[in-house]
Amino acid sequence: MPTVSIITITYNAERFLERTIKSIVTQQATDYEYIVVDGASTDGTLAIIKRYEKHITHWISEADSGLYDAMNKGLHRATGDYVWFMNAGDELFDSNTLPDLLQKIDASHADVYYSDALFVRDNGPDRPATPLGLRSQVTPHTLPHTLTWQDMKLGMKVCHQAFVARRAIAPDYPTNNLSADLDWEIRCLKAAQNIEFVPFVLCKYLMGGLSVQQHRRSLIDRFNILGKHFGMLPTLLNHGQIVWRALKRVQKQ
């Protein structure tokens, strides 16, 4: 049984997928499995997957009910002690990221490991992405070095691709909510006995995901998730703080 299951979800992402796969299969480590879940892509995605097939532990390509349904499929196929989602377009930060993480896991065996993420912007095929800055620096979400689930009251403190959870505490994602990753992180943190900050960047996060593309619905879904975990009245009050924070940020720009 591998220590870490790395899972990539992809759909018609031939432009981005290869950079994700390369960032994983070039790692100087072997104690992991790599799972790719494709939603029956109609572009060149399958050709890319087959090109790297010898490096992929398991892959499937079939229709699904959306991103989080596909993530559940990956979660159910994982056999590692820990699960780590690195979706098409995202990358492990550098070739030492996985070995360094495995060393941390071997030393402490925490239930959750988390770190910062480097935001990047795509520049087209065969061109390196442009770094935009660390998530904790370019968004209002500062990154605490001692994380609890209560830290999520104003939104997602940790980028999903910089959050590695023990598979035994990892629940299924709700498939009808665009902020399902926030709900997943909160439930993992609630179940975790030991949560450890990783003092190096875990990933490069490609800007422009599903929740960005459907921003209004994502905000409503986030409100419902936070209301479920923190109560509706505290969530209403907290959203007043979120709006104030956003207005102050716009004024500074």
Image: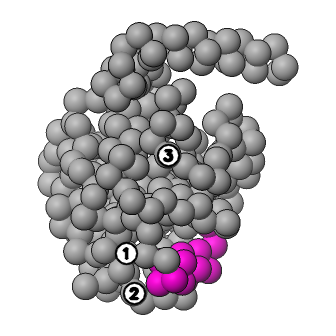
Left or right: where 218 falls relative to 156: left
Counting from the top left corner in percent of width and height, residue 7 is at 34, 64
Read off the magenta span: 93-107
Instruction: Say which residue appears at 48% left-offset and 59% top-offset.
Output: 195
Task: Name the foreground residue: 10 vs 3.
Answer: 3
Q: Residues within 10 Å of mark 1 (few under 14, many from 20)?
A: many
Ranked by sequence position, the earlier of labels 3 and 1 is: 1
Q: Nearer the viewer, mark 3 or mark 1?
A: 3
Disc 1 element: strand
Mark 3 — residue? 148
Ranked by sequence position, the earlier of labels 3 and 2 is: 2
Counting from the top left corner in percent of width and height, residue 196 is at 54, 63
Q: Main secondary structure of the magenta part?
A: helix
Q: Residues within 10 Å of mark 2 (few under 14, many from 20)?
A: some
Using the rendered view, name the quadrant where residue 231 is placed: top left
Amino acid type at circle 3 is Thr
Instruction: Say which residue appears at 59% left-offset and 61% top-offset.
Output: 197
